[in-house]
Image: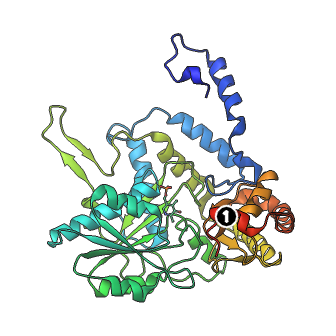
Amino acid sequence: MSDHHARLPEGGLSVEEVLAEVARDRVGDIDWRSGKAFSLVYNAADDDLERLQHAIADDFLHENALNPFAYATLLRMEQEIVEMAADLLGGPQHAGALTSGGTESIFCAVQTARDMGLERGIDSPVALVPSTAHPAFTKAGHYLRLEVRRVPVGTDGRADVGAMVDAIDTDTVLLVGSAPCYPYGVIDPIADLAAAASEHDLLCHVDACLGGWILPFWEALGEAVPPWDLSTPGVTSLSADLHKYAYAFKGASVILYNDRSMLKRQHFIFDDWPGGLYASATTAGTRPGPPIAGAWATLHHLGRDGLIAKTRVVRDTAHTMIGGLRTIGDLHTVHEPDMSVACFGSPTVDMNAVADVMDTRGWRLDRQPDGLHFMVSPGHAGHAEEWLGDLAFAFANHGEAKDVFAPYSGTA
Ligand SMILES: *Cc1c(COP(=O)(O)O)cnc(C)c1O
């Protein structure tokens, strides 16, 4: 936005002027519809769905879900989303909530675990998470005064259950696993981790923010998926983002527990206020209607068949991309991805240099210390061959010697 608008404009601009200015300023933003962007937008490539989402967001633009009695429709939608999630992900009924995103779902799980620890007399509760767990755990620990210890993962990129068990001490309250983790797209050994948690009388959270709304359909396609959801003995809570592989627009995730008594710990009620009784089920106060109505409409429009169809497209495209990249020079996936998210690198070539060349061709791959990262959405389906062609070109023509880029690269 141009500088002169850093201050509240004296006179307002017309609708047309505002829209024209935004259109001008947006030119440099990543175009998620191009099929060349990764990770920030899960492009469903579905015109009907997009039409529905625009219409429903418009319908509920000004509604506020803070008071569930004022907008009973939003309350019902929210409850139905949570029940659908619980049904899909092996949880009991009435033991979950809709949140604004993965971070908020994880905050709720961490707060619940912290409070259960405090109640047991653990004054400095600790959560053990694999080194690949999302930063949201460390962030939640930072806000909520719970220490988050990161335990190095095994050589396969998956949580090292033995090392996590070794790290358990009298302050430990929570073990975490991901299904899958964001950096490598690998699923932690949830069954073993949850069994260890239950053996030591600890809570176990599964971060399925990424996989929660695709792994059930991945499995339905006949792919091997290890146990990971709330039906796995010992798993006590689970987070799953609707704004990722359920193709809802941003602002929707679920936190589910295996017991309603855990959910109640995140409920907040305050009755000593001149404004009257105040209650909330998650960290937010005022809550926008569009993400709730949008997620509900998306699940109802797609249904199980629609989500399976999208998963098939994602799987086939991921197989093409992952299989194809392995035929280019010495490129390889850093670990063996379980799903549609991967990190790839090379023992000889600086991947930042490869990414620089890819950038010139419009691709926006994410850069990690040990390689380049991508997550596949249906919007990539028509672009896999072009991506592979450009990747082969970039690999052959990255130009620069590796040591020139060494300061910027974590590649071994
Ligand atoms: C995206 C993600 C999160 C955080 O979710 P936000 O919606 O970005 O807050 C947590 N864990 C994993 C594995 C994720 O992919």
Q: Which residue lies at the image location 33% right of the left edge and 58% below the top edge?
A: 142
Q: Is residue 103 above or below residue 149?
A: above
Instruction: Write down the residue under mark 1.
Output: 374
Q: Nearer the viewer, residue 387 or 195?
A: 387
Q: Nearer the viewer, residue 159 or 370?
A: 370
The quadrant holding residue 308 is bottom right
Q: Amino acid at mark 1?
A: Phe
Dot 1 lies on which element?
A: strand
Residue 8 coordinates in the image, percent (x, y): 49, 19
Q: Nearer the viewer, residue 75 or 404?
A: 404
Q: Which residue lies at the image location 36% right of the left edge and 39% below the top edge?
A: 286
70 horizontally vs 188: left or right: left
**Image color mode:** rainbow
The quadrant holding residue 139 is bottom left
The answer to whether residue 412 is seen in the rendering is: yes
Q: Is residue 131 above or below residue 42?
A: below
The answer to whether residue 233 is seen in the rendering is: no
Residue farthest along the front direction in this orientation:
404
Quadrant of the drawing holding the N terminus: top right
Q: Nearer the viewer, residue 36 or 382?
A: 36
Residue 9 coordinates in the image, percent (x, y): 52, 15
308 horizontally vs 292: left or right: right
Residue 27 coordinates in the image, percent (x, y): 72, 35
Q: Is mark 1 within 8 Å of ligand 1?
A: no
Quadrant of the drawing holding the C terminus: bottom right
Give the number of callouts: 1
Q: Is residue 225 above or below residue 342?
A: below
Q: Residues within 10 Å of mark 1 (few under 14, many from 20)?
A: many
Q: Which residue lies at the image location 65% right of the left edge and 71% below the top edge?
A: 342
Residue 95 coordinates in the image, percent (x, y): 33, 64
